[in-house]
Image: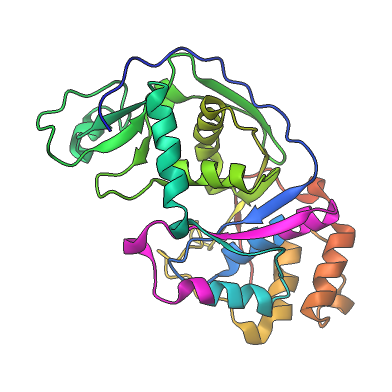
Amino acid sequence: MGAASAAPNITMTAPAPKCPYIGRFAPSPSGPLHFGSLVSAVASYLDAKAHNGTWLVRMDDIDPPREMPGAADLILQQLQQHSLNWDGDVLYQSQRSGAYLATLEKLQHKGLVYPCQCSRQQLKKQGGIHPSRCQLKDPSAPAALRLAAPAQSQIEFEDIFQGQQRQNIKHEVGDVVLHRKDSLFAYQLAVVVDDAFQQISHIIRGSDLLSSTPRQICLQQLLGLLTPQYGHIPVATNPDGQKLSKQNLTPSIDAKTASANLASALRWLGLPLPKARYSASSHELLSWGIEHWQRKLISPVMEKVTFNR
């Protein structure tokens, strides 16, 4: 794809999603589920089922260098071992390249995509923000494709748990990458295309993705897509304040203690689980969780330290 004409100024709004409720859990197969990812899965599952909705699972497997062999199947197995049974078929992003390419071509036709060969070092000098189009030094060299964010790109939306959010894409984020130099599709593009394809109405996920949401809403608006309702729960951290993640070597959840894992997740989400319920089966715990789920019990903080389970 070559350079395109200047991007138009577009006023951004975030329309409310339409019924029915369709939620999703979209893990990356870079490793097995840990307690933090289990909490996100349980929160999205309970919110969907408490609203008589559908709960889908999508595998965000578009970054092979970061993936762990066998992790996708292991994650699905772990979900089932915790009675987190999804509706319909699992969607794999690795099988969706045609849809992503078609969307890139649509954006190029609108004059909203341009090639970029800037290095990370160059962007670091600009505070990490890519503010404008590039002058390609070598048109034959690999180039990323960036979204030309409109000059007027103030995004505002009401998060279910975190309240009113605002971000100016052009000045606070810059022109985001949609297609990488290594020819892989970027997360921001894939997630928007697939959420629209699956008709996702509600997205409940960790607050570490809150800053990405305005970029996704911006892209949705430019593509004429509906915007889901977003809710970002606190990220689980260890006592040192580190996010529970595969990068921080957080241990995998043990299927042998599935009920105890779910009980801990329910309590972490603010649900007042009676002690008599601690020994219940995974299915019974989730049924109780659906019955007692209340969004107002979720703390609006961005991070929350785990406790001994």
The quarter of the picture where residue 180 lies is top left
Quarter placement of the N terminus: top left
Outermost residue, left side = 138
Q: Does 180 appear in magenta?
A: no
Q: Which residues are magenta?
A: 45-73
Quarter placement of the C terminus: bottom right
Q: Is residue 82 above or below residue 20?
A: below
Q: Residue at x 42, y 22 (%)?
A: 110
Of 13 and 107, the residue lying toward us: 107
Residue 179 on image: x %, y %: 34, 42
Q: Is residue 306 above or below residue 118?
A: below
Of 117 and 226, the residue lying toward us: 226
Q: Is residue 63 above or below residue 6?
A: below
The quarter of the picture where residue 158 lies is top right
Residue 130 on image: x %, y %: 31, 27
Q: Is residue 239 above or below residue 104?
A: below
Q: Residue at x 34, y 32 (%)?
A: 146
Of 236 and 33, the residue lying toward us: 33
Q: Residue at x 56, y 15 (%)?
A: 11
Of 118 and 296, the residue lying toward us: 118
Judge whether residue 233 can be spotted in this image.
no
Q: Is residue 62 left or right of residue 50?
A: left
Residue 147 on image: x %, y %: 38, 29
Colour convention of the picture:
rainbow
Count the labels in the image: 0
Outermost residue, bottom side = 256
